[in-house]
Image: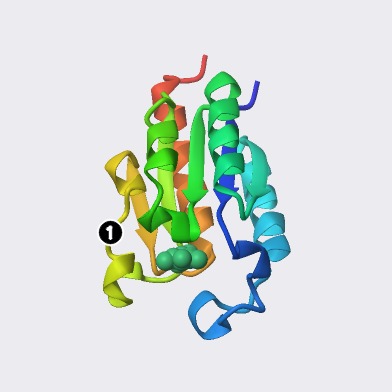
């Protein structure tokens, strides 16, 4: 069975491509989903690609992932900097967590420098554009393969 990976996107990322393209680029979320799905197939991962503007929905998806997923890639967007609740949810998840930011949050306003989610993340990617999601998936595939041992 292919390992399940949840890829979660937070608020306003549904507007990717239209929203401040000078910061977040011209690719839409549908473009990102298409590319991530193609890569996940290549890497042998089963992808659940989700986006919500509602904090509780992201928390519910993390709870869902507890039951079925080996890893979570999460761009919590603005919730990165505010949500103890998402951090608490991620702390109940036993698999790998990769945090992705499209922009380099450290080059931006000070309030974006702090991430609650980084207190749990196994890896953090920032400022590599929407390609960051793909780097995250590649890294997970490597880690999951080494965790499952050599193939018989
Ligand atoms: C996306 C957002 O919506 C912001 O609130 C974060 C993040 C940065 C990103 O770079 O993907 O501060």
Left or right: 147 in relation to 23: left
Q: Which residue is mark 1?
A: 114
Left or right: 148 in relation to 29: left
**Which residue is at a point 37% across and 30% down the rendered structure image?**
91
Give the percent coordinates (x, y) of residue 152.
Answer: 52, 14
Give the percent coordinates (x, y) of residue 52.
Answer: 64, 51
Left or right: 75 in relation to 5: left
The one nearer the camera, 46 or 109, is: 109
Quarter of the image where one finds residue 92: top left
The one nearer the camera, 64 or 34, is: 64
**Which residue is at a point 57% across and 59% down the rendered structure image?**
11
Question: Considering only vertical position in the picture, is 95 above or below 55?
Answer: above
Question: Considering only vertical position in the picture, is 88 above or below 41?
Answer: above
Left or right: 2 in relation to 117: right
**Which residue is at a point 55% across and 47% down the rendered structure image?**
55
Quarter of the image where one finds residue 148: top left
The one nearer the camera, 47 or 10, is: 10
Residue placed farthest to the bottom in the image? 22
Give the percent coordinates (x, y) of residue 142.
Answer: 43, 38
Question: Considering only vertical position in the picture, is 52 above or below 122?
Answer: below
**Which residue is at a point 53% across and 37% down the rendered structure image?**
59
**Is disc 1's CB within 8 Å of ligand 1?**
no
Question: Considering only vertical position in the picture, is 19 above or below 42?
Answer: below
């Amino acid at each position: 069975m292919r390992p399940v990976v949840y890829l979660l996107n937070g608020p306003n990322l549904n507007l990717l491509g239209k929203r401040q393209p000078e910061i977040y680029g011209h690719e839409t979320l549908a473009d990102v989903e298409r590319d991530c799905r193609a890569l996940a197939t290549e890497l042998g991962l089963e992808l659940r690609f989700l986006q919500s503007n509602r904090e509780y929905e992201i928390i519910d998806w993390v709870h869902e992932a507890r039951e079925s997923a080996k890893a979570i890639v999460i761009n919590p967007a603005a919730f990165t900097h505010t949500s103890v609740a998402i951090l608490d949810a991620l702390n109940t998840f036993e698999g790998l967590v990769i945090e992705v930011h499209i922009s380099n949050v450290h080059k931006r306003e000070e309030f974006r420098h702090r991430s609650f989610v980084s207190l749990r993340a196994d890896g953090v990617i920032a400022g590599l554009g929407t390609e960051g999601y793909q780097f995250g998936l590649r890294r997970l595939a490597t880690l999951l393969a080494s965790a499952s041992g050599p193939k018989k």
